Amino acid sequence: MKRYTLIITAILITFVLPACGKKIGGKEKAAPERPVVSGVVTEAINPVKVTDYYETLGTVKAEDTAVVSARMTGTVKAIHVRAGDPVKPGDLLVELDSPEIEAKLRAAREGREEALRGLEMAGKEKTLAEKTFQRYKALFEEKAISEQEFDQIKTKRDLAVLGHELAEKRLKRVEAQVREAESYRAFTRITSPVSGVVAEKKIDLGSMAMPGVPLLIIEKRDYLVEASVNEELLGKVREGMRLFLEFPSLSLRTEGVVKEVIRQVDPSTRTFRVKIRPDQMPGSLRGGLFSRIRIPLGEKEILLIPETAVVKRGQLRGVYTVGKDGVLSLRYIKTGRAYPGGIEVLSGLEPGERVVVKGVEKAVDGGILKEDRAESVDRNIFVAGAETGVLPLSGLLHTDVSENMTPDMEREG
């Protein structure tokens, strides 16, 4: 009997005493208070239509490129341009030093001077011989001199005429040599063949320039973006199609038109090449710059949140959601592509849920937003689209708690 009494007593102690302990001094224990969060903006996240796109990488290349090289061997003694300098046809780019050419030019010019003096003397001899011949001819007709004497004078006249002709031909040969030496000397002054921008300098002062070896590369100001595209889009990308381009180094976003589609597929990468002409070509655009290309594929519905709503915890991304009872909860999500209007949410968030989009630094996990301190405002958010420019993202709920709080309510918080 005592054994059963002990068992009953133990049961009463187990179940009755904890119930009695809920009251201290006749009062129930108060639940812990949640921190009140204010100064944040919340928004109801609903599906929006955005343009789906295929993204690839590209490189800026000049449509036409001129490779400047020397036409003779010589030492570089002066470079008058640098990479990035604009040039036009005839601008002096590089000067070469070639002592052999200078020596040939001096010799040719001295030979021309000798040929000119020789021609002058030959002309005088020809004139004298002609006058002498005319006098002896008159004497011969009057039988004053013998035929032998007349033949001697005639022969001298003929030799003087021949000597003058040879002097003229020699002068022409020497002048040709001078022109040749001067043309070779002109090769030591390398000028720009086209208008454009110096893209690259491949030689330095004191280097030896050789025929056919590139010295400078000049790009014309017409640029194209060349990109490799997956072969699955071979039938969708066509000439004249408009695409989106981004140049991160220039902080430039623009559109472009497909100028050429090279339909030969590379078997190693399973891609084909596309050449795109940008709508905007600022002066800072250069060959070799990196570019992102977005090819529109059609519309799709996604959940899009503002970048200001994302909380970063190392490699994790999260948002503060607002429950029906106004309690904030930090929820980790998986994000996708970044769009002009925000970041795509792949998982972790349901349509219609409210999240904190501004003032996330004030949000506290487990904190509470009181509904009587918030005013719901229906606003529109615009997300840049791929074909229409902007797509309206309407029906999103914004709640700015701090704007609608009275001074008394602020003191209470």
Image: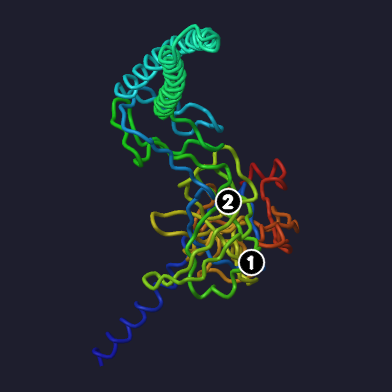
How crowded pointer 2 is (Cα within 10 Å; few <14, some 14-19, many 20+) is rated as many
Mark number, residue 37: 2
Residue 114 in percent (x, y) is at 39, 13
Disc number placed over residue 325 in the picture, else none: none
Between 382 and 272, the one nearer to me in the picture: 272
Residue 229 in the image: x percent, y percent? Answer: 49, 66
As shown in the figure, which amino acid type bears the numbered disc 1?
Thr
Q: Residue furthest front?
A: 143
Badge 1 or badge 2: first in the primary sequence: 2
Which quarter of the image is occupied by the N terminus?
bottom left
Q: Is residue 297 above or below residue 69?
A: below
User: What SS does tag 2 mark?
Assistant: loop
What's the mark number on residue 51? 1
Q: Residue at the spot x=56%, y=37% of the render? A: 195
Q: Amino acid at mark 2?
A: Val
- Secondary structure of the residue carrying tag 1 is strand
Relative to 345, residue 206 above or below: above
Residue at 51% x, 52% y: name it.
291
According to the image, what is the colour scheme of the structure? rainbow
- Residue 347 vs 284, above or below: the answer is below
> Closer to the camera, 339 or 119?
119
Q: Is residue 180 visible?
A: yes
Could you give the CA–CA distance between mark 1 and mark 2, rounded to whole angstroms? 36 Å
User: Can you give x and y, in whole percent of width and height, for residue 145 in the image?
Assistant: 46, 8
Residue 44 seen anywhere in this rendered image of the structure: no
